[in-house]
Image: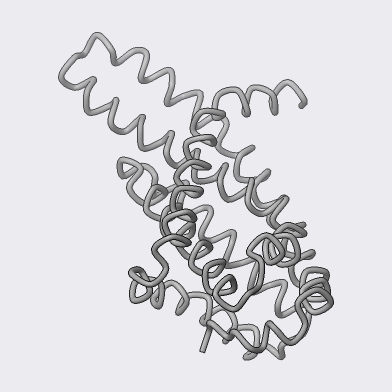
Amino acid sequence: MRTQFNRLWTDNRKYFLTACLLFGGGAVLGFLQAHALEEMVKSLLGQLKDVIDRIHANGGGVFATFWAIFSNNVTSSLMMMAMGLFFAFFPVFGLMANGVLLGFIFAKYSSFGVSPWLVFAAGILPHGILELPAVLFAAGVGIRLGMLSLRSVGALIQPVKWEQVKNDWYDTLKQFPMVVLTVIGMLFLAAIIESSVTPLILQEVLGDQLKQLNLIK
């Protein structure tokens, strides 16, 4: 099992790092250009509002919060993987968009005198230590599938490359079940933390400042 995980990491490492760069680049852009991107971010905040509305519709308890977060993250992650087949457009766009959203939120808190690092440490790091790697790894696998799709098109022009492309497809699809199970397992644990631990830390650290800046209306 350990050998399989090592192989999984080795084969997907560069795509994971690419996903990290795209997400990080989006976050920097969202932070530095928050005002210019405000209209675009409104639609992304609307998606967060949908999750919050689902939580309220199901009673607003810890389990409702857990399920809304878990199901949303699993759906988004698996979509980024599967839709990566279409030349990696979906995972690349999803990474940039979510990065922009995070940077925008940090910028808004910063404008109210709240340290973005404090927001990250209290509101994201507790569950993000599992959630972010899971989502970024899923997106990285989606990018890998997109690159294989592009190489497959190229192999139609240069048939001599087809054998290597075919072997790479086989290796990638063979790893797919382990990727899915690993991502879902990490997101499951992250959702437990996010629904039960993170709110307590946020309330303790930021308190009334959370109410002063209500981004999701």
Residue 68 percent location from the top left of the image: 64, 74
Tell me: 123 left or right of 111.
right
What colour scheme governs how the chains and residues are painted in the rendered image of this protein? one colour
* Depth order, front residue of 47/115: 115
Residue 3 percent location from the top left of the image: 73, 20
* Depth order, front residue of 200/108: 108
Residue 74, located in which quarter of the rendered image? bottom right
Tell me: 99 left or right of 53.
left
Residue 64 percent location from the top left of the image: 71, 80
Which residue is located at x 45 percent, y 42 percent? 142
* Depth order, front residue of 50/208: 208
Residue 196, located in which quarter of the rendered image? bottom right
Q: Is residue 125 above or below residue 71?
A: above
Q: Which residue is at the far top? A: 160
Q: Which residue is at the far left? A: 157
Give the total number of marks visible in the rendering. Answer: 0
Q: Is residue 124 above or below residue 89?
A: below
Tell me: 13 left or right of 163.
right
